Image (cartoon, helix red, strand yellow):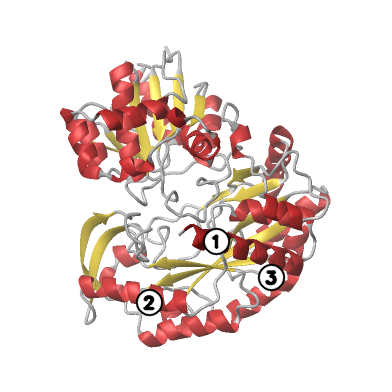
Amino acid sequence: MMPKRIKLIRIPYFTYSPDKKQRFKCEHFPPLALGVLNSYLKDKSIILELDDLHVKVHYDNFYSDVVSEKIDYEAFFDKERIVAHIKNDGDQYLDDMVRRIMQKTSIDGYDFILLSSPAPIDISPVTSTVLIAKFIKEKSKAKIIVGGGGCPDLWQLGLEKKLIDFIVQGPGEIPLFNLIKELTGINTALNNANLTVADSRIIINSDYVAPILPNFDDLPIGKYRWFPDDFLSQQVPKNNLEKGILIIPFRFIIGCPFHCAFCCESGKEKQILFISPEKAVDCLEILKSRYDTEHFFFLSSTLNLNKNYINKFCDEIIRRRLKIYWTDCANFKYLDKDTLLKMRQAGAIRLIWGLETGSPRMLRYIDKGVTIEWAAEMLQASHEAGIWNGLEIICGLPHEKEEDVNQTINFLNKNSYYIDTVYLNPFYLDGSSLLFKYPSRYGIKNIKHIQRFATHKTEGPLDNYVFEFAFDEIDGLEWEDKLKQIVASFNKVQQNIRGGFWTNEMEAILFYLYSHLKDKKQIKEIYNSWADHKMKEVYSSI
């Protein structure tokens, strides 16, 4: 017999809370993972109830005047204190913070409670997950299954203390279906060929299922709606504030055909799963109607798998006269001016391009497969089509030299008119990348697992990032010096370019401006004036 009740909860985390530039310190859209799991399991006759403690915590922290509804995020960054608490030392303050969180949902009467956590950047999703599991175990007989991108030591401590029953790493659809069936006596599914079971309670899965229509029903949809502040609403003529901006995430392409050596997808067996352009647009029509929105955040590794796919997708939107606005990631390959114009006509408002470096030598090193010249041409074409250009840059790639850093700065400044936002990232070694899988090929050695979480305690440039592995360069820098070089590269690029202003509200603001205005020049002027206004607020509060 299937369990009577199963609840799937997104746990709260606090990665962006310390940033004073954030008005509402949480992303403004429902979690795709919950929507996909809900659809997949419901199709298998397993009914879930959903809740999102993440958005509820941040919503109440921002909007509520009731002190007992607010959460002190600082408490979730004190790992030593939390470890002591988990080991039954007791901590009234931590208990009170978790109780405040859990007052925002119900845990009574469930056979299974599934806790969804993001891949940890800082320590807060790790700590909040194990603290919530502890709370549930003390109040309920439900089995607790934790899902996320890894298995940090605190979760292993949770297993040891029997606060967590199972941990699922990787895509959750297949293992959750099999695990629930196994635990309810339907069949013995844990030996499924797709799964690896470690110590019988840690299940590792690398297989995705094909993209499906997500179901966000039961989530607190109203809390994801974004409304402009007074400054923005005064800048946009005839704006409609009644509904606000609701952004719905959707992924209809999983995987990437390219082989960029640093990428988490590059070292794994290629799994490229996608639905037809026609079916993808069918899903968009359903989502638009069901959630009364025109705004979509696509989560492809790269939207332009090939020239044929992206053109058919846009043609289908245009043919149906489907009025939507969307943003996604793109590769510089398989695009041209006509395709970019068509993408804009089909609703594209922003593309995030992964260039990573302005150095031709480093582009060859990471197997990027594009030239600086072609990247510049596509950025210009995208800008002229009216699309907002975001550009990803990685600082401190292995064997990066001062000349490479200077070439990156020169490229960004030379093309700054066409680049609207620069997303700077320090290099970190991903355990699923070609660099990790074939280190000697890429001139690195002595890879060590360090699991250095990001922190918000100081204001250094690397405090918002996690370093899971340390390494040495062959005939180059050892790790401690390499880390310093990554910092120096990041600082130099940041201080010498004209990068765009980014906040958690950025997507909502772009959707708001693009849905009210047609001219990109005007959109950028208003966005920049808002950013200047926001920065003055930040500095005046310091």
Mark 1 highlights which residue? Answer: 502
Sequence-earlier tag: 1 or 3: 3
**Dot 1 amino acid type:** Trp
Residue at 61% over, 49% down: 297
Q: Nearer the viewer, residue 192 or 47?
A: 47
- Residue 316, compared with residue 31, is above or below; it is below
Q: Residue 204: horizontal and vertical position, in percent?
A: 32, 41
Sequence-earlier tag: 2 or 3: 3
Q: Separation of disc 2 and disc 1 at Cα?
A: 20 Å
Q: Secondary structure at mark 2?
A: helix
Q: Separation of disc 2 and disc 3 at Cα?
A: 28 Å
Looking at the figure, which quarter contains the N terminus?
A: top left
Sequence-earlier tag: 2 or 1: 2
Mark 2 highlights which residue? Answer: 489
Instruction: Left or right? Give the position of 191 relative to 316.
Output: left
Check if mark 2's residue and mark 3's residue have beta carbons within 8 Å: no
Query: Mark 2 or mark 3: which is in front?
Result: 2
Q: Residue 332: horizontal and vertical position, in percent?
A: 59, 71
Residue 93 seen in the figure: yes
| Number of marks in picture | 3
Query: Mark 2 or mark 1: which is in front?
Result: 1
Mark 3 highlights which residue? Answer: 382
Query: Mark 1 or mark 3: which is in front?
Result: 1
Q: Secondary structure at mark 1?
A: loop
Q: Separation of disc 1 and disc 3 at Cα?
A: 20 Å
